[in-house]
Amino acid sequence: MLKSVRNSAGNVLLQILAATAVMSTSFYFLTNYVIGQKEQVGTTVNLVNLRFALNSAMDYVIFGVRQKYCFTTDYALLNDSPEKCNLQHSGNIERLLMSVDQEKFIQSLLATNQSVGPVNANEIRLTEIHRLIDVSVATTEHPLFPVLSSLKTVKGADGKPVKVGWISVDIFRDNSAYLPKAGNEVYLKIKVALKEYKESEPLAFGRTKMELTSQVVIYPREVGSFALLVPGDLHLDLPWDASMTDGNVSLHKFASRNDVGTSPGLVFNSPVFVNKDIYLPVDNGSEKDVAGTTFYSAVTFADRVYLGNGWVKRNSDEKYAPRSLGGLADRYWADARTFGGFLKGIENDGGLDKGLEVFKKGPGSVNSGALASSMEMMKKCIDFALSRAKIDEIKKSELGARITSETNTEFDYRITLSKGNEFSRQWNSLRINKTAWADGKVEIDQGDIYVGGAVVQLRINVGGRYVEFQLPRNGYAKITAPVGSPTYENGLLAAKQSAETKYNAALTEQSSLNAQLTKARADLKTAEAKLAEEEAKPERKVASTSEPAPADSGTATPQSTPTEGATTPKTTTEKSTTTESGTTAQAPESTTQDPVEYQDPVVISNLEKQIASLNATIKDLNNNKIPAQDSVVNLASKEVDMKKADYNGFLTLKANPPVIEVDTSRVKNRYDYAYDKLDLDFEVANAKSFLDANGNLVAPVVKIQAYDATFYRSEPIYTNSNDKDGDNLLGYLNFGFNASKTYLDAPESAMNAPNSTSANPVDDSDYTVLAEQCEAARNASTSQSFGGAGWSTDFSASTRISWNFAGTGSTKAGQDPALNELIFSNINALRSNATFQVRSIVGKCTIKESAEFVTGFFGCDSLEIEARTKPLRIIGTFIVGKMRINSQAIKAGISWSSIYHPQSTVELRNAGILRSFSGRACDAKGADPIWHPIPSAIQVADRMGCNSISLRAKADPFQWTSVDPDCGLVSNGGNSSNTTCKRRMVRFFVVEQSREGGI
C-alpha cells in the first residue's frame, strides 16, 4: 500500500515537471509571437500613417488643381492671395492648364494693349510646377496638419524613428502623343514623395520608396454638362409650393417613403449645380423605421452634385451629420433614409458662380455706364435698320413717356415710340366712349379732323368709371369727372340724419340725469334739516344706584337713580316683574305723560341712512353718470358735426368737380417735326374731388394707346393670333396724390400696367441723328465681330445680356427676358414631335401634364412642372431663377439628364432629334471603320449628326464653363461697341485615371 502511494506521488511529480516544461516552451514561443505581433502592429501603424500622409497630400494637390490654386512658395503649399495670383506666378495652375491657343490669344491681347495683369509675354504657359511642404512648420490651421503631425511619430522597419522633414510635390503637363485627345483635354502627372531633406531622394520603408504618382485628365466643365443649375439654395426639406426667394428652389418633402409608392421620384442622371447650400430633411424616424414616419424627399442624384460655395445642411442652418458616425447603416450617401442620396458624392468649387448671382435677380440686372451705353447703341442701330424693312419689326416698337414739366396742376409729358416708329393718323371721326362715365362730361375740339386725324386714344379711369376719347397731333379735350354717386350722396344724408337722431336722444338722457341730480340735492337738504332738528332734542338718560349689588347675591340689580339734570316723573307706581333668578323686582310704571320730547334713535338712524344714500346717488351722478352722458353728448355732437361736414363737403366737391384739360402737340426736331414723338399736356383742377361711386378718393389712371402704321381707322390691320395687337403701344400714367390729398402727384414715366411700378422704356433719340451715329459706329468698329477681352475682364454684371442670345422670331432685340413664356405640351413635347430647343432667357417655362419628352438648353427665370400622372423625361440643361415641381409630378416620376448621358444619345436618336445628314440610320454600320485615318466628309457629318456633340454647337454660351460669361459687351469708346471674349476656362472636371506607388 505504501509503495503504491509512493509510486503515485512520483508520477504526479513527473507530470508536474512535464507540464512545467511544456508551459515554459509554450511561453517561450508565445513570447516571440506576441513580440512579433507587437512589432507588426507597430509597423502597420507606421505604414498607415505614411500611406495616409501620401494619399492625403495627393488629394490636397488634386483639390488645388481643381480650384486653380496658385501654390505658394513658402513651403506651406497654400493658395496664394488673389493679388499675387497672376500670369507671372510660378505656382499658377491656370498657367499649367493653358493651351497653346490660349497663350497665343493672350499674346494677341498684349499686342493690342489689353490688360491681362503682370505677365512675361514669352513665358505665359507652364509645363511643370515644383513645390515643397516643410513638415516642421505646418501650423494647426494648415489643411494637412493632422497627417503632417502623425509623421513625427513614424518609425522604420528597424524600430528607429524615421525623420520625415519634407513632402515634395511635382506637377507635370503630360504632352505624350500617345494620349487620346478630342478637344481641350489636359493631362497631368502628379508626384508626391516623403523626404528627409529638401534635396534628398524619397525615403524608403524597407525596399519601397515613399512616393505616389497620379495620372489626371482635365477637361472643361461646360454648363451644358449639367441637368440643372440653381443660383441659390436647394431645399429638400420643404413642400414644393413653399414660398422661396429668387434663386432658391424647393423639391417636395413627403411625410414618408410610403407616400411615393414604387415611383423612383425625381432622378438626376447627370450632374446638378447648386450655387449655395443644400438642405436635407431631418431623419425623424426610429432606428428600425425603413419607411414608416421618416420624412422623405423623392429626389435621387445619380451623378455628382457640385456646390459653388455651400454646405449640406439640415434643420435650418445646422450642418448635416448622419445619425451615427461610422455606423454600418450610415457609411454612404446612398444609405440616407430621407432622400434618394448623392450616389456619386458632392464636390465644392470653393466660390460662387457670380453669373448665377446676377441671373437670379431677373430682368434689368445689368451693369450701368459704358457697357449699358454700348449695348443701347448697338440695339438702337439694329432696331432702326429693321424697323424700316419689316412690319413684324415695326410691331416691336414700344410706347414710352417721360415728364418734362410739372406744377401742382399742370403736367407735361413727352410721348415717344421706340425704334424710330412713327405716329400714324387714323382717318376716322374722333371717337368718344362715355358709357361708363356716369354724369361726367366730355368736350373735344374736333378741329379739322380730316387734316389731323387721331394719333392717340386716351382712357381716363377713376375707380371703376372711365371715359375713352381720341386726339389728333394738335388736339384739345376737356373732361369733367363725375363725383360720387346718388347712392353715395343718399348714404351721407342718411348718416347725417341718424347722427342727429342719436344726438337728440343723448340730450334727452342728459336732461333726465341733471333733473335727478337736482331732486337728490333737494332731498338731501330736507333730510339733513330733519336730522339736525332731531339731534337738537335732549337725549333720554336712564338712572342707576350708587352701590351696585354683589355679583353673586342672586338678587336683581336695583334700577339706577336718575342722573343730574334728568327729569323725574312726578307720580309712579310699582309693578312686579320676575327676574331670571326667580326673585321679584319692582319696575316703575308711568302713570302721568312726560311733557319733555326726547331724541328718537330710530328716526335718527333712518335719516342718516337716507342721507348716506342720497350722498351716494349724488356722487354717482356727479362722478359717473352725468360725465359719461356728457361724453356721449359730446361724441354725438362731434358725430353730427362730422356727418354734416361729410355731407356738406360732398356737396361742395360735387359743385366743383374735377376738370382735366388735355392738349396734344407736335414736337420739333432739327429739320421739321418728329413723327415718333408727341407732347401730351394735362391741366387738372379740383383734384381733391376725384371720388369714385363709393366716395373714395381715387387718383386717375390715364391709359395711352398710340396708333402707328399697323392701324387703320383705329383698328389693327395686321393680326397675329399669338399676340395682342397694339399692346406694345400701350402706356399707363398712374397718378397719385400729394401728402395733403389736394393735388395730384404725377408719375415720372408711363408704366406697363395700371398700378404698376415697372416703367416702359423711353426712347428719346433723334433718329435723324441716330442714322448718322450708326453709320459712324459701323465705320469705327473693328473688322472682327468677336474680339478679345482682357484676361481679367469681369462680365458677370452683364450676365443677362450675354445669356440673352436665343429668343424667337418675334423677340425684340435686347429684350429681357427674350421670351415671356414657353409652354411644353403634347403639341411640342412628345417623342413623336419634340425638337431640341435653345431658349434663353425665358420669363416662365411651363411643362404641362400632356408633355412627355422635353429636350434643349434653357435659361428660365421660372420653371414650373405641373401635376401629372405619367412619367416625364427631360434631356438637356435648365438654368432657373426659381422652380416649382408639383409633388404629383415627382410621384409620377421624372428622369432628368444632360445631353451627354449615354442613354440620352439613344433616346434622342429614337426621337429623330439626332440623325445623320445622309439619311443613313445612326445605328447602321459604316463602310469604313471609325479609326480610318481619312474618313469621308459624309461619314464625318453623319457621325457628328448622330451624336450629342452636334447639339452642343447650337448654343455657344452652354459651352462656357460657368454662367459667369466668357463673352460680353465692352465699349471701345465713342459710339462703338464690340462683343468680346476672354476664352478662359473657369471650371473643369478633374478625373483621376490612376494612382500608383506608395507603400
Image: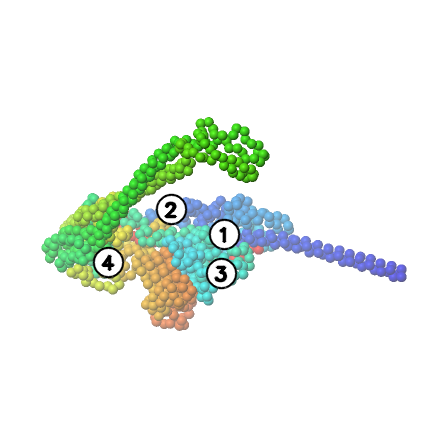
Task: Say which of marks 4 and 3 sits in front.
Answer: 3
**Label 1 vs 3, first from the N-terminus:** 1
Query: With 706 as the anchor, is 115 left or right in this view?
Result: right
The amino acid type of the residue labelled 1 equals Tyr
Q: Where does residue 341 sit, x and y in percent of width and height?
A: 47, 60
Q: Quadrant of the C terminus?
A: bottom right
- For label 3, the residue is 293
Mark 3 or 2: the one toward you: 3
Corner quadrant of residue 967? bottom left
Do labels 1 and 3 touch, CB within 8 Å?
no
- Which comes before the other along the chain, label 4 or label 3? 3
Secondary structure at numbered mark 4: helix
Label at residue 117: 2
> Residue at coordinates 36% horizontally, 59% vertically from top-left?
863
Query: How many neighbours does mark 1 have within 10 angstroms: few (below 14), some (14-19), or many (20 or more)?
Result: some
Residue at the far top: name it. 564
Alpha carbon distance from label 1 to label 4? 59 Å
Q: Nearer the viewer, mark 1 or mark 4?
A: 4
Q: CA distance from mark 2 to mark 4?
A: 50 Å
- The first of marks 1 and 4 along the sequence is 1
In the depicted view, which residue is nearer to us: 323 or 694?
694
Can I make out residue 66 in this image? Answer: no
Q: Residue at x 26, y 60 (%)?
A: 810
